[in-house]
Amino acid sequence: MADLKMNISCFFFIQVLLLLLLSSFPPTNAQGLKVGFYDKTCPKAEAIVKKSVSDAMKNDPTIGAPLLRMFFHDCFVRGCDGSVLLELKNKKDEKNAPPNLSLRGFEVIDNVKAAVEEECPGVVSCSDVLALVARDAVVELDGLSWGVETGRRDGRVTNINEARSNLPSPLNNITSLITQFSSKGLDKKDLAVLSGGHTVGQGHCPLILNRLYNFTGKGDSDPDLDTEYAATLRKKCKPTDTTTALEMDPGSFKTFDESYFKLVSQRRGFFQSDAALLNNKETKSYVLKQMNSQGSTFSGDFGVSMVKMGRIGVLTGKAGEVRKKCRMVN
């Protein structure tokens, strides 16, 4: 009996020890990433990316938000592995999935990669280029900078169906959004924070027509949408409009700030997914917190959540490859 008690005690001791050891390590998919990964192998890499993004946005001031969006769309499908950049002859790639058809800025990524390749051939991955470009685009839009973890390697697979099934939809309710973000290791705060990316850029009429004209199939509008704002949107988005793009954060869509959260709190979020943030206690609390007298925490929070998102499913070490050109495998 004494031996049995000792064996049981040893068993539980070993379990606790294993848990403590495991908790001391970072998540598996983040291993190998660090800020300044290229400091020795390509010390000018981040400066080259920064200048390339700055030049691109001087040429087209509206390209910043699409570049940020591209990183989101990459990370939510197969992880942050640059798979959204790949092109297949049969068009069955992520680029051709319906949610990605409105992505733009691929030529900017090509130019950034070419500039980095000229300095350090075969060193900096396309997936890291995407991560750095997203950060630098936010900075160009007057947002705060953050330290980008690098060290990713590029994937060799792209699949149109995976993009269809993994990307959150602007039509999603709060339950679906929480589930999708949770499946990527992101919590409710990350959901609220990263949704704040809608403070810049434009949204297209087809994605809100149901909110304006036929929300429940009875010719009605979304009750979660402010009536005056709905009337304004109906003037700009006719029932058959398939092309018009509107500012998601009117009057501030070129500036990365917390004004998005004020709009959401006033029931003036552009997408259903924006309005959905008010339907959960934790996400609603974050939205309202951004307008309190002590000041918004959004700018700082965004960098933290971007780093967290940037760890999703990464390839490091000898996994994957470092592509020479981002649109094709080596």
Image (cartoon, helix red, strand yellow):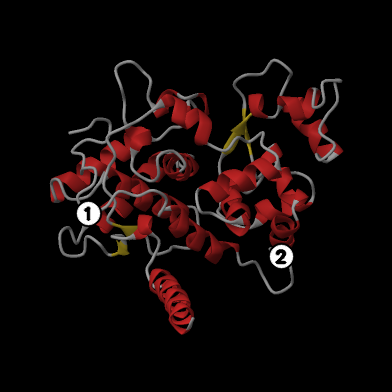
Q: Which residue is drawn at 24% across and 30% down?
A: 328
Residue 253 rendering spot, x and y as whole percentages: 59, 45
Disc with the residue nearer the chain's start (1 vs 2) = 2
Q: Name the residue under label 2.
A: 289
Residue 98 rendering spot, x and y as whole percentages: 51, 24
Q: Nearer the viewer, residue 129 or 262?
A: 129
Q: Which residue lies furthest to the front in this view?
A: 1
Q: Name the residue under label 1.
A: 317
> Residue 308 vs residue 171: left or right?
left
Element under disc 1: loop
Query: In whole angstroms, how far apart are the C-alphas of marks 1 and 2?
Result: 40 Å
The kind of residue on which mark 2 rests is Lys
Residue 9 rendering spot, x and y as whole percentages: 47, 80
Q: Which residue is drawn at 77% across and 49% down?
A: 279
Instruction: Please tell me how crowded label 1 is: few (under 14), some (14-19), or many (20+) other residues with Cα within 10 Å.
Output: few
The kind of residue on which mark 1 rests is Gly
Q: Which mark is residue 295?
A: none
Q: Is residue 254 visible?
A: no
Q: Which residue is drawn at 71% across and 49% down?
A: 277
Q: Nearer the viewer, residue 310 or 317?
A: 317
Image vertical order of residue 75 relative to residue 165, above or below? below
Image vertical order of residue 173 relative to residue 264, above or below? above
